[in-house]
Image (cartoon, rainbow, N blue to C red):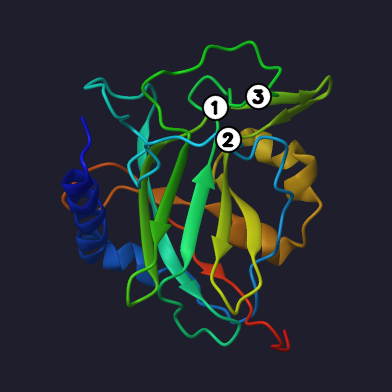
Amino acid sequence: MKSRRGFLKSTGLALTALGSWKAIEASAAQVCGVTAPQPRGPFYPIVNQADKDTDLTTVVGSSAKAVGEVVWVTGTVRDQNCAVVDGALVEIWQACASGRYNHPNDPNTAPLDPNFQYWGRAITDAQGRYAFKTIRPGAYPADRDWVRPPHIHFRVMKRGYHELVTQMYFAGEGLNADDRILQSMSPQDQNEAVVQFQVPVGGGEPVGVFDLKIAKVGARV
């Protein structure tokens, strides 16, 4: 069972672990500007849940683990001039390994995972960093001739900045080439949205670096 102390500990461990991923993080391009927005989609959480910390692989009250490949998603939030943004709220939400969202409007008949959290929140640290432990989501049908590839939704907020809603995709996924949302973006924006996951030196779960850029209110971008 998670506790407040456990939540703070897990968050601290996640950010501490970033130190071992510097080689991966350093390889991510730092380009000024703003991350391209993408649709929020119909499955943003509408029902509050007690457990919405940075570890989506377990839930309060259960010792079982979520089904699926465990991955870490980390990155740095910056402004349009590449200055780090501390204290920003970063939310993620996604489907479980079967491709279903924990949302009353999801028509997918795939099974839900009772041990997956589905929705998490992080606050960026003094260096603008965030980190989530989650699973690679499953693909799911969006229309009769459209299957959405695995992706994670992001929402970034801080007072004085424009809210950002976007999506992150997994490199090497064949369905990316036919995704209507991803393919509607410019090549540069696609490149930033598709993340390569790598196993850190010394082993462990794969880590993907997804840096996010938000604009200050009134800034020219």
- On screen, residue 197 above or below 67: below
Give the residue number, with chain letter if any, for mark 3.
140
- Split into 4 quadrants, where in the image is the C terminus? bottom right
- Split into 4 quadrants, where in the image is the N terminus? top left
Q: Is residue 210 visible?
A: no
Q: Amino acid at mark 3?
A: Tyr
Q: Is residue 17 visible?
A: yes
Name the secondary structure under disc 2.
loop
Q: Amino acid at mark 2?
A: Pro
Give the residue number, with chain letter if any, for mark 1.
138
Q: Nearer the viewer, residue 62 or 30?
A: 62
Query: Residue 3's mark?
Result: none
Residue 184 percent coordinates (x, y) = 81, 52
* Mark before the other along the chain sequence, 2 or 3: 3
Label 2 to label 1, Cα distance in Å? 5 Å
Q: Nearer the viewer, residue 155 or 104?
A: 104
Mark 2–mark 1 CB contact (< 8 Å)? yes
Residue sitting at x 47%, y 62%: 89
Label 2 to label 3, Cα distance in Å? 8 Å
Residue sitting at x 61%, y 56%: 193
Classify residue 106 by image quadrant: top right
- On screen, residue 158 above or below 74: below
Mark 3–mark 1 CB contact (< 8 Å)? yes
Give the residue number, with chain letter if any, for mark 2.
150
